[in-house]
Image (cartoon, rainbow, N blue to C red):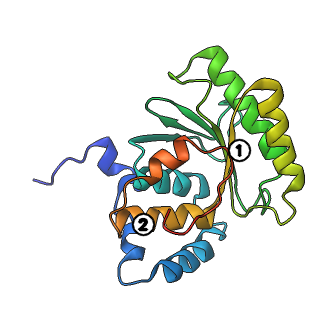
């Protein structure tokens, strides 16, 4: 008699972890380059892939909505305490985190705080995740500073290549502090040597 799979095992997102398979026998840079090429392809479920990377980094549960689903305000939520809302920009929408991404991240945080979907703190950031960080960062950085100054809300920004590197560092190198770096993220994530 075949084994009955649990919902978690049946879900393609929880099947064989494609990132884990892909990271074997590759250097960090080879892994990042390879996965970025796959993620830019429209056939990949970009939002689900972001959720899988975040869980690989150490977040126990990431709830991801279907791309384009406007019934739920957030594109994803890092559950646990504190909960962190996420605005995701797929390459089909835009290649770069932009001003709209930052405004939507602010809206996500306001909705999470006002409706109490998940327990959180005002200090925990709202994240904007995109395929790339903009080359001209001044407008995005200025808006993040303005939001902090006026609303006392922290916005964190991270790109796909950095998420892939963090995933590699956690799953292959066994590093464990990267989850906390994201929980404390303020502004654009800047990779620091030995972070």
Q: Position of residue 85 (x, y in %)?
A: 61, 35
Q: Position of residue 27 (x, y in %)?
A: 44, 83
The residue located at (69%, 31%) in the rendering is 108
Judge depth for marks 1 and 2 and give the one in front: 2
Number of numbered discs: 2
- Determine whether, in the image, residue 159 is placed left or right of residue 106: left
Q: Are marks 1 and 2 in contact (CB under 8 Å)?
A: no
Q: Residue at x 67, y 66 (%)?
A: 42
- 183 on left or right of 20: right
Q: Quadrant of residue 190?
A: bottom right
- The location of residue 173, given as percent across then percent down, is 35, 69
Local SS, label 1: loop
> Along the horizontal axis of the image, is 177 left or right of 71?
left
Q: Residues within 10 Å of mark 1 (few under 14, many from 20)?
A: few
Query: In this view of the protein, which residue sits in the foreground, 171 or 111?
Result: 171
Relative to 35, does residue 14 appear above or below in the rendering? above
Q: Residues within 10 Å of mark 2 (few under 14, many from 20)?
A: some
Q: Closer to the camera, 167 or 52?
A: 167
Q: Residue furthest front?
A: 193
Residue visible at 48% across and 51% down in the picture: 54
Residue name at image x 55 percent, y 60 percent: 163
| Residue in the foreground of this view, choosing between 141 and 127 | 141
Residue 77 point in image, percent of width and height: 55, 37
Q: Is residue 16 above or below residue 52?
A: below
Relative vertical location of residue 24 with respect to residue 63 in this rendering, above or below: below
Element marked by disc 2: helix
Judge from the rendering whether residue 117 lies leftward or rightward of residue 152; answer left or right.
Answer: left
- What residue did someone put label 1 on? 68
Task: Quote the CA–CA distance across marks 1 and 2.
Answer: 31 Å
Q: Earlier in the sequence, mark 1 or mark 2?
A: 1
Q: Residue 183 shows which numbered tag?
A: none
Residue highlighted by disc 2: 169
């Amino acid at each position: 008699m075949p084994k009955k799979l649990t919902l978690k095992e049946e879900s393609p997102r929880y099947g064989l972890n494609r990132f884990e398979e892909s990271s074997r026998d590759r250097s960090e840079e080879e892994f990042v380059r390879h996965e970025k090429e796959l993620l830019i392809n429209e056939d990949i479920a970009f939002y689900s892939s972001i959720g899988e990377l975040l869980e690989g980094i150490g977040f126990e549960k990431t709830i991801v909505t279907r791309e384009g689903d406007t019934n739920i305000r957030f594109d994803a939520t890092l559950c646990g305490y504190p909960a962190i809302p996420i605005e995701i920009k797929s390459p089909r929408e835009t290649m770069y985190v932009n001003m709209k991404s930052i405004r939507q991240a602010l809206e996500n945080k306001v909705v999470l705080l006002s409706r109490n979907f998940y327990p959180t703190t005002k200090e925990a950031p709202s994240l904007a995740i995109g395929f790339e960080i903009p080359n001209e960062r001044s407008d995005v950085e200025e808006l993040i500073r303005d939001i902090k100054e006026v609303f006392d809300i922290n916005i964190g920004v991270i790109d796909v290549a950095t998420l892939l590197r963090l995933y590699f560092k956690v799953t292959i190198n066994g590093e464990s502090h990267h989850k906390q770096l994201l929980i404390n993220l303020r502004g654009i994530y800047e990779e620091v040597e030995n972070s």
